[in-house]
Image: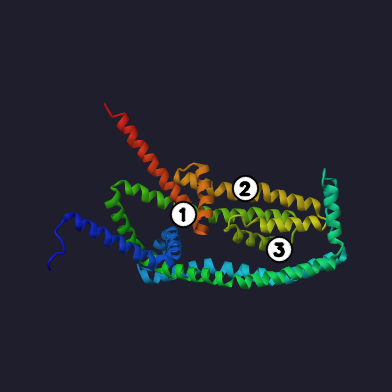
Amino acid sequence: MRELTTNPLAKRVLLVMFLGALVLAVSVVLTPFIIPMLWAGILGFSTWPLYLWLLKKMGKRQTASALLLTLLMSALVVFPVLWLLFLLRAESSPLLDLLTAELGSGRIRPPAFISKLPIFGAELSASLGALLAEPAQISFELKNHLRQLDAYAFALLGGIGKNIIKMVFALFTLFFVYLHGDSVARQIRTICISLLGERAGGYLKTVALTTRAVVYGIVLTALIQGAVAGLGYWAAGLSAPVTLAAVTVLLAMVPFGTPLVWGAAGLWLLFTGQTAAGIGLLLWGVLVVSWVDNIVRPLVLSEVVNIPFILALFGVLGGLAAFGLVGLFLGPVILAVALAVWREWLDDENALSNPPP
């Protein structure tokens, strides 16, 4: 076949145009699946040692091992979320009835110490007292808000449905990550080394260490927060401290989710006359439970990846703000790779400035 042109420059321009159009077309096709693919890659990579162990136990049967571990990860991801949703939905009405009964009996009242606060204490206590003096109105408002919450939840079903679909695609992709992950990893490494040279190996190692550190840090942080908060619930004398601790573990997966549990429990204790227990639980939540998330997760990152604590913290929070939940992983990875490149450049510059004798 006769070539359209023999000009080398024209050939290079046509090649660049072709590759650019191909990349654009691929990005358009895969854009709806980028987030599920990222989640599948993160889950698959962080649980890869477990897959290798299972593969060995099942006699190197790749398909069966990948399917079994995918089903296990699906159960670990889906069932706790469904349990939390059903728990919140089932307990909302009994909780409202209990609150209405407590309001009607007059047992819910502002803590006595509020009136002793300087400047605004007396006015705040009087306002809360006047508000609690109309239990029927409060019950009506709570029921109205509950109905609005249900309506809001139904309005969110579209968004939730999209997230559920993304989760299904992520778990479906996870099966193929287990099945072909080793081959894909070798191909990625080959391409990166061909583009960046041998230094790409260090960058890929940084990505690997950071991803696993973030995943393990999130799980470890959630478990520690649940255990510490559960100790506080038990010490405060709340009923079902184990259930409250389990809910705290699940909400700890979401940044700043734990105050919804220990904060509500502390306020309940305060307004039911258990002032010491309420203040103690709120202080425990602020000073201990919440700071676990701010310390343990960045600390795991800084220890494993050798990244400064403050940079690890910025990576977690900045990634969340920029990319959503998946940014919890992307943010630290991006900063860790950037730091690795920075350190390598500094090492090269120092080597050039101070050549060996």
3D distance between C-alphas at marks 2 and 1: 22 Å
Percent across and percent down for residue 120 are 82, 47
Identify the mark nearer the N-term, 3 or 2: 3
Q: Quadrant of residue 248?
A: bottom right
Residue at the spot x=55%, y=69% of the render? 159
Percent across and percent down for residue 25 are 34, 66
Quarter that holds the N terminus: bottom left
What is the residue that sits farthest to the top in this orientation? 357
Q: Nearer the viewer, residue 295 or 67?
A: 295
Q: Secondary structure at mark 1?
A: helix
Q: Is residue 127 visible?
A: yes
Dot 2: few (<14), some (14–19), or many (≥20) neighbours within 10 Å?
few
Residue at numbered disc 3: 240
Residue at numbered disc 2: 291
Percent across and percent down for residue 95 are 75, 68
Three-letter amino acid code of the residue under disc 3: Ala
3D distance between C-alphas at marks 3 and 2: 24 Å
Q: Nearer the viewer, residue 91 or 4?
A: 4
Q: Secondary structure at mark 3?
A: loop
Percent across and percent down for residue 242 are 67, 61
**Numbered label attached to residue 330:** 1
